[in-house]
Image (tube, rainbow, N blue to C red):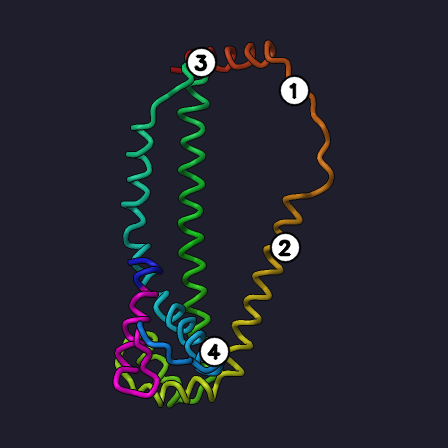
Amino acid sequence: MNQTTISEAFGEQLALITADTPYAIESDSDTFVSELEHKVRKFMYSLWMDAQANKLANYLEKRQTAHFAQLYEFSYGIPVYDNEDRFSNRTDALALMIIDEKASYKKRIERIRLQYKRFNEICEQLSVEDRELFIRYFEWSQKVDYETLRNTVIRNLTMISERYLHDEQMAEEQTKEISESIKGPAQQIVPKPDMAKRSRRQNKMRSLFTQGR
């Protein structure tokens, strides 16, 4: 399971509930989709991805241990090209790569959980009837009447669009802040270290490492 399969499932489910209705769009059809219908389906897609996010997060957590184990198995097969820097190239670099991948994997799960949280927060602002319909279709993937679903989305379109717009703006601001923090002040030119001194330090570290065995 991944976001691609969830996205494809949305297309299949949409085709199912719009079949034999005025909203059915064939792949080879030139039927025009109105601006409103386009907006409705856009937010339906967003709601679907958010509602299904909990299943994806659970799946990723279940295979987390196996994924981390694969990282270590893969690292054993990476050749060492620089025998002189064996410890830094092989041990240190791979250890850092694995640590980064673990952190990235966990952050991905956290982001996906936030998607599901957003879906629940949107549902909390709906009437009981509308909330039940959203959960049945977007989260449980049950077949519903498209006209009813469409009208429900339209009825709550302002609230839904404002929530997604707010989150998009927050994401853009965070990206901008991160970008500015990375750039930081003007970079100073730092002279290259003396290679002979660097070599002596490395040899000393290797000697200490060997003595500790």
| Front residue (pair 117, 50) | 50
Q: Residues within 10 Å of mark 2 (few under 14, many from 20)?
A: few
* Residue lying at 72% horizontally and 28% vertically, measured from the top left: 189
| Front residue (pair 158, 84) | 158
Q: Are marks 2 and 3 in contact (CB under 8 Å)?
A: no
The residue that mark 4 highlights is 39
Of the numbered discs 1 and 3, the one sitting upstream in the chain is 3
The residue that mark 2 highlights is 176
Of the numbered discs 4 and 2, the one sitting upstream in the chain is 4
How many tags in the picture? 4
Q: Is residue 57 visible?
A: no
Task: Determine which quarter of the picture holds residue 74.
Answer: top left
Of the numbered discs 1 and 2, the one sitting upstream in the chain is 2
Q: Are marks 1 and 2 in contact (CB under 8 Å)?
A: no
The residue that mark 3 highlights is 84
Instruction: Give the magenta range.
Output: 6-27
Residue 30 vertical placement versus 87 (above, below): below
Determine whether the residue tagged by mark 3 lies in a helix, strand or loop. loop
The residue that mark 1 highlights is 192
* Residue lying at 26% horizontally and 86% vertically, measured from the top left: 20
* Residue lying at 42% horizontally and 54% vertically, measured from the top left: 108
- Per the model, the C-alpha gap separating discs 4 and 1 is 56 Å
Tell me residue 65's x, y (percent).
29, 46
- Does residue 24 belong to the magenta stretch? yes
Task: Determine which quarter of the picture holds residue 89.
Answer: top left
Nearer the camera: disc 4 or disc 3:
4
- Does residue 157 belong to the magenta stretch? no
